[in-house]
Every structure is written in structure tokens, then in C-alpha cells.
Image (cartoon, rainbow, N blue to C red):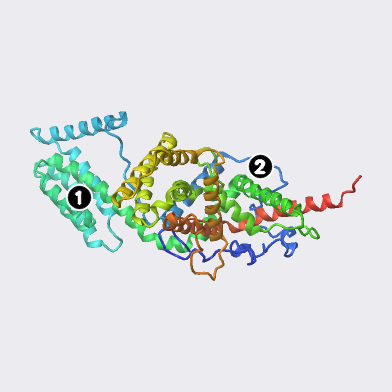
Amino acid sequence: MPFNDEKQCVGEDHPSDSDSSRFSESMASLSDYECSRQSFTSDSSSKSSSPVSTSPPRVVTFDEVMTAARNLSNMTLAHEIAVNENFELKQDAVPENSLAGQVKHIVHQAFWDVLESELNADPPEYEHAIKLFEEIREILLSFLTPGGNRLRNQICEVLDTDLIRQQAEHSAVDIPGLANYVISTMGKLCAPVRDDDIRELKATGNIVEMLRKIFHVLDLMKMDMVNFTIKSIRPHLQRQLVEYERTKFQEILEETPSALDQTTEWIKESVNEELLSLSESALTPGAENSSKPSLSPTVVLNNSYLKLLKWDYQKKDLPETLVTDGARLQELTEKLNQLKIIACLSLITKNMVGAVTEGFPELTNRLKRISAVLLEGMNKQTFNLKEALNSIGVQTCVEVNKTLTERGLPTLNAEVQANLIGQFSSIQEEDNSIWSLIDKRIQLYMKSLLCLPSSQKCMPPVPGGLTIIQQELEALGCQYANIVNLNKQVYGPFYANILRKLLFIEEAVGKVNASSPTN
């Protein structure tokens, strides 16, 4: 199973058009459309998985919606843990200057002030302190493994609140001694990354401040324990992820029958586009028209995946089956858009001043780095792309002239510089020929990744004009193919049902049109 941080061959587990359209083990029956028609007409689809149903919609109760939401939440969390090696939980940080942060600070400060006044009273009041040690005891016990009986008994014995309360009644309780025991026990249980925090606790002289810091470090230890547990279960989730996600999504589908509507529309759009493409090919002069061309389920599904590379993630909802990878796909698309512009700029520079800069590879790399820096954050709404492109153009002229001057060569004249900057700025214009060319070649490369046969163990060649971004493009392509492969494995049965319905409907319509009498 491919995961984001693994350097695997993208050809593994990729179906090809020449194969039997194997989306997953459950899609083996969906060979290219020329195969057995019975696979499309048989009643072999699993219950509730059928995206096209003639049954009237049933009323979904609030409890069913909440159950589906919980299932989706659990599935999303499991998916993130399994595929993201860097995933970990962090404490929610409330900004100090916010209203919530100010309220939190005031309430906490009031509590610790009350505790300090009680301990400094004559005679001291220990009830709040005892409750704190009771809470600390439960937290420490939660860190123990089932086999830690000796330490468990010791903690329960030392932090016995009934005993502490009796000692307090006779003014014999040793609050600093209990706090030091807690710190010593925390030192035995904490991760090495908390050693400095433990040393800082030991150096704290004020007992109230010490207790306050103890709770802070305990909160950090809780997160450490959670993230350690996540790391421990990751290998098990990775082995079981496909079956787990498929089962969870089936439960969601049973609770919410419309849970595949967006996915159906997503695939249907590709079906319509492929039909249009086949119709145009059939009308081409000299084309073979003896038999009606049929759709390939593999091509349809791969074209659907390619649409994700141009998806408007801010305004358009993702298909339900890709929600768990939405953030990864959006980040991938944003990086790809930046690479497209860098490739366009490189191609323009090569076409215009390549004759005078040829043989200076360090200049090419420097221009690439400058472009990447100035395009940082280009996907934010506040980013001014036209201004950034103009700045890149100006900086490119400066760097080229600097290199030429260092080698005693004549610099670019004003007309060439103005033309270069103008062409850079025009990239953002609609139907720009350079942008269209680079975009088409990147789409072709990504499509080739999805069509690699499983026997191929190397990356496909990068099309011309993309050499400048080859390394980054291969890394993004590998990540993209891994996401697609895993998605096919998990949701293959659901895609199979959708494609059966859609492709069968299209053929049925085609047969009706062919048999209709002409006037």
C-alpha cells in the first residue's frame, strides 16, 4: 500500500487500459466495456452501494445523520494517521490577546491566587491542594501500562487523599514533599523530550508555582502519550486501512443514501466528456465508422482523477470518496500551479535569450530559485500574481545582465528586456499559448502515471519543456499516484457500481437512438 512519505514506484497497483480495467479486487468484473454485458446488467452490486436507484428517498433521522457524521470523523482520523507519517495531535493554543485567552488567564490566575492564600493562611487550608493531588494521581495512573502494578501501588499509597486529609487535620501534611514525589514520578514516566521541563520543575521554589507548572507539564505528557499511541497503531491501521475505510463508508452510505451523489456527478462529467471526444473522433474524415466505439471505465475514472489537479477547492465540493485526502490534494494542486508558472517562465527565457545564456546552468538554477521565492503564497487571495510576474521579469533581466557582464559579454538591450517582462506578465492572461502548452504537457505526464502497467518499475519520461521542474514534478507525481492508488483500492466497489449504471445507461441510449426510424 503506498503512503505519502514512501519512495515507491508509482507503477505499482496502477491499472492500464490494456489490463482488465482493474480498479481494485472488486472491480475485476469491470473490464473495458467490450467485455461481458452481464457484468453491467446483473444484480451483483452490494446493498446500498448502488448510486442510481429507482426507490423513493427515505427520511433520514437526526440520530442517523449523527451516526454517519461520527463514522466519517473516525474514518477521516484513521486515514490521516495511516497515510501521514508526520501526523500528531497538538494542544489547542488560545491567543493571549483574544477575549477567550484573557478570560482563561483571569480565571486560572484567580484559582492559583486562592490556592496561595489558603496555603499561607494561619492555620493553612489544604482542601484545594488535596483535590489537586487527587487529580494529579489519576493523571499519573493513566500513563501506566497494565503491567506497572508496583508503581501503581506506590502512587496510590503516597497520593492517598484520605491519608493526606487526615494529615492535614493534624497539620502534618508535607505539601512540598508530595510535589517533589510527583515530579520524581513524572521524570520516570515522561518522554526524553520533557527532561528539561522536569529539571525546571525541580528548580522551582514557590510551591504554588510548582503545582501550576506540574499541571502544564502533565498536559504536555498527555499529548506525548496520545502521539506515542498514534505512532504505535499506525502500522496496524496501514495494514487494515483499505478494509476499514471501505466498511466505514458503507456504514455511512447505509445511514445517508445520498452520500455518493457528488461522486456520481464527478464521474458522470468524465463519461460525458469521453463520449463527446469519441463522437468527434468518429466524425473525423477517414475514421473507422463501422462499429460504435465503447467507453473504457479505466479511462473514465483516470480522467476523473485528473480533474482534481484543476479543482477549485475554495468554491467546489470534493467527491465524497476523496474528502479524506482533500487537504493533500489541494496542497498538491497549489504546488503544481507554482511549478507550471516556473516552467512557463523558463521556457520564455530560453526562447528569448537562450542564445546568449546557453552554457550557464548556474544562472538557470538561480532564476528558478528567484521565481520560486517570489511566487511563494501565490494561492492566497491577497496575492498579486501580475505584480509578482513583473518583479520576476525585472529580476531575471538583472541576473542575466549581471552574468553577461561578468563574462565580458554585451547586456540585453532595453527592447529585449521590455519584451521579456511583458511576456512574463502575460502568462496569467486567458488562453496564453505558453501556459496552455505547459499545462497540457503536465496533464499528459500525470495521466501517464495513472496508466503505468504494474510491471513497470520506473518513472515515465518527462515531456519537453519540463526539465527545469523535473525533480519537483516527479515527487508530486509520485504523491499524486499514491493518493489515487489508495483511493482506488478503498472505493473501487463503489466506483464499479457507479460506472455500471452510467455506462449501461449510455449504451442503452445509444441503442435506442440507433434503432429509431428516420423520417
Up the image or down, 414 lies above or below 2; here it is: above
Residue 143: quarter of image: bottom left
Q: Residue 170 carries which label?
A: none
Tell which of 315 and 230 is nearer to you. 315
Crowdedness of circle 2 by 10 Å Cα count: few (<14), some, many (20+)? few
Q: Alpha carbon of mark 2 to alpha carbon of mark 1: how far?
A: 57 Å
Circle 2 is placed at which residue position? 58
Circle 2 — which element? loop
- Judged from the image, the secondary structure of the residue bearing numbered disc 1 is loop
Q: Position of residue 490 (x, y in %)?
A: 54, 58
Residue kind at label 2, given as amino acid type: Arg
Please give left or right for residue 428 compared with residue 162 in the image: right
Quarter of the image holding residue 193?
bottom left
Kindly identify which residue carries mark 1: 160
Image quarter of the C terminus: top right
In which quarter of the view is residue 35 placed?
bottom right
Of residue 186 and residue 146, the one placed in the foreground of this image is 186
Q: Mark 1 is on which residue type?
A: Asp
Q: Residue 114 in the image: state x and y as whole percent.
A: 17, 32
Q: Which one is earlier in the sequence, the residue at label 2 or at label 1? A: 2
Q: Which of 380 and 355 is in front in this view?
A: 355
Q: Which residue is at a point 69% across and 51% down the rendered structure image?
A: 277
Of residue 85 and residue 154, the one placed in the foreground of this image is: 85
Horizontally, residue 429 falls left or right of residue 86, namely: right
Q: Position of residue 371 (x, y in %)?
A: 38, 45
Q: What residue is at 60 percent from the left and 64 percent from the top?
A: 16
- Mark 2–mark 1 contact, CB under 8 Å? no
